[in-house]
Image (spheres, rainbow, N blue to C red):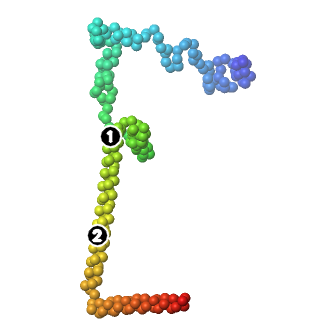
Amino acid sequence: MNAHALLTSQGWRGTGHSLHPTSDHTGLSRPLLVSRKDNTLGVGKKQHRTSDMWWMNAFDSSLKSLDTSKEGQVVQTNTSGSLDMVKKGGGKYVGTDVGKGLYACFVRGECLSGTIEETKVEAVSEGAESEESERPKKRRKSERAEEDTKEERRARKLARRAARAKKTAAKQEKAKKKAQMISKTEDEDKESTAKTETKEERKERRRLKKLAKEAEKNYITLSEKAKKKKRRKDS
């Protein structure tokens, strides 16, 4: 594309003039300079120099300073290498020991706590703990049979029988005490009614008793007479 011909066709007056049709005071009179990339460097950073392998040199120097002449012992002869300087720290805010480094300048405060409740997580963890606690209880019979001997099984059976017998004896004793209490209360009620009974009530009770006996005798006699009549008819 010919840019010069295109601009002149649109009204441009030529090189040295702005794009304004009549005045050179407005607009650009010089072309914009565009930066061109003509090297192998990165954007904003220079390329790493692979010739200076400082980390390999640091490791080599630290390995060379180790003395292995004594059997079973490793002694470091030189403590001024690059890696040692990283541990010691060359300045005020450098180092890995307690009280050194940038963290020595800050005051420790409270940690920020989240707003999400962790009840579900606790429930899940409790459920997992309960499952783990129930696992040893639910062992197979074969494993128990292998671990326990005959004597131990017999001892366990005897202990169970003794516990059952003790429980049944306690239940029987409780039922016996309950029956005694009921009979005692009934006797007390009878005694209280007998004490509170008057002369007229006693007379009435005796009269009713006498009438009941007479009615029973009359019923017996009537039944005997009916039987005799039936025999006579049959004969």
User: Which residue position is annotated with label 1?
Assistant: 151
How many numbered marks have been drawn onto this rendered protein structure? 2
Which amino acid type corresponds to the residue marked 2 in the rendered image?
Gln
- Write down the quadrant of residue 24 in the picture: top right
User: 125 or 154, which lies in front?
Assistant: 154
Circle 1/circle 2 CB separation < 8 Å:
no
- Write down the quadrant of residue 152 in the picture: top left
State which tag comes first along the sequence, 1 or 2: 1
Checking the image for residue 14, the label placed there is: none
Residue 7 as seen in the image, left or right of residue 178: right
User: 162 or 119, which lies in front?
Assistant: 162
Residue 234 as seen in the image, left or right of residue 131: right
Q: Is residue 123 above or below residue 4?
A: below
Report the Cα–Cα distance between label 1 and label 2.
43 Å
Which amino acid type corresponds to the residue marked 1 in the rendered image?
Glu
Element on which disc 2 rests: helix
- Within-10-Å neighbours for mark 1: few <14, some 14–19, many 20+: few
Residue at the image position 53 percent from the left and 19 percent from the top: 43
- Within-10-Å neighbours for mark 2: few <14, some 14–19, many 20+: few
Q: Quadrant of the C terminus?
A: bottom right
Residue at the image position 42 percent from the left and 42 percent from the top: 138
| Residue 24 visible in rendering | yes
The furthest residue to the front: 235
Q: Quadrant of the N terminus?
A: top right
Q: Position of residue 155 (x, y in %)?
A: 31, 44
Q: Position of residue 7 (x, y in %)?
A: 71, 22
User: Which residue position is annotated with label 2?
Assistant: 180
- Write down the quadrant of residue 22 in the picture: top right
Q: Is residue 177 above or below residue 41?
A: below
